[in-house]
């Protein structure tokens, strides 16, 4: 139901845009998480589908922007000023609750990951 795309290799300081298309239904909230090798999956950003609202991890605030296209039922993650520490597999996730959430366990649906590699 969630299809993520847009990962790739980019130099430090560069940009990438990830997309996550939801099929079959509309979710009230969607988010992005990432997981680097040997590390826990961590929250990156979330956006509400019904009410205006976004949330970001401190590590990406000011560099990443999450947005949505209601008509396409798609959420995007624009990543600018990428750093080597941003390299990870990025996962999109969705939940039905109206409240924005930062915890992995709060999300009910997950897409497959898309790899982001940042060269220094």
Image: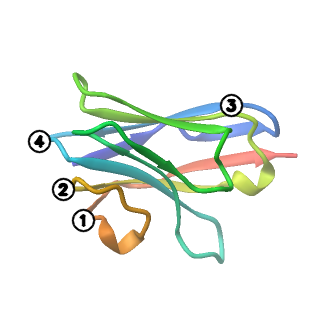
Identify the element where label 3 is drawn. Answer: loop
Name the residue tied to disc 3: 15
Residue 73 vertical placement versus 93 (above, below): above
Question: Which label sits in the foreground, 4 or 1?
Answer: 1
Q: CA distance from mark 3 to mark 1?
A: 29 Å
Closer to us: 41 or 117: 41
Q: CA distance from mark 3 to mark 2?
A: 30 Å
Name the residue tied to disc 4: 24
Q: Are marks 3 and 1 in contact (CB under 8 Å)?
A: no
The furthest residue to the right: 120
Closer to us: 56 or 31: 56
Question: Which label sits in the foreground, 3 or 2?
Answer: 2
Name the residue tied to disc 2: 96
Q: Position of residue 30 (x, y in %)?
A: 33, 48
* Tag shown at residue 3: none
Q: Counting residues from the N terminus, which is met first, the one under dot 2 or under dot 1?
A: 2
Q: Are marks 2 and 1 in contact (CB under 8 Å)?
A: yes
Indicate left or right for 102 with 1 as reference: right
Q: Counting residues from the N terminus, which is met first, the one under dot 4 or under dot 2?
A: 4
Q: Position of residue 104 (x, y in %)?
A: 40, 70
Q: How crowded is the residue under tag 3: few (<14 C-alpha within 10 Å), some, or many (20+)? A: some
Name the residue tied to disc 1: 108
Q: CA distance from mark 4 to mark 3?
A: 30 Å
Q: Counting residues from the N terminus, which is met first, the one under dot 4 or under dot 3?
A: 3
């Amino acid at each position: 139901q969630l299809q993520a795309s847009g990962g790739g290799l980019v130099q430090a300081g560069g940009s990438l845009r990830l997309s996550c298309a939801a099929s079959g239904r509309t979710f009230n909230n969607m988010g992005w998480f990432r997981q680097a090798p040997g590390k826990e999956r961590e929250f990156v950003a979330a956006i509400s589908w019904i009410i205006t609202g976004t949330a970001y991890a401190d590590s990406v605030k000011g560099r990443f922007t999450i947005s949505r296209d209601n008509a396409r039922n798609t959420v995007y993650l624009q990543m600018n000023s990428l750093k080597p520490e941003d390299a990870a597999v990025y996962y999109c996730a969705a939940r039905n609750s109206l409240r924005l959430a930062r915890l992995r366990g709060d999300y009910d649906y997950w897409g497959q990951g898309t790899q982001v590699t940042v060269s220094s």
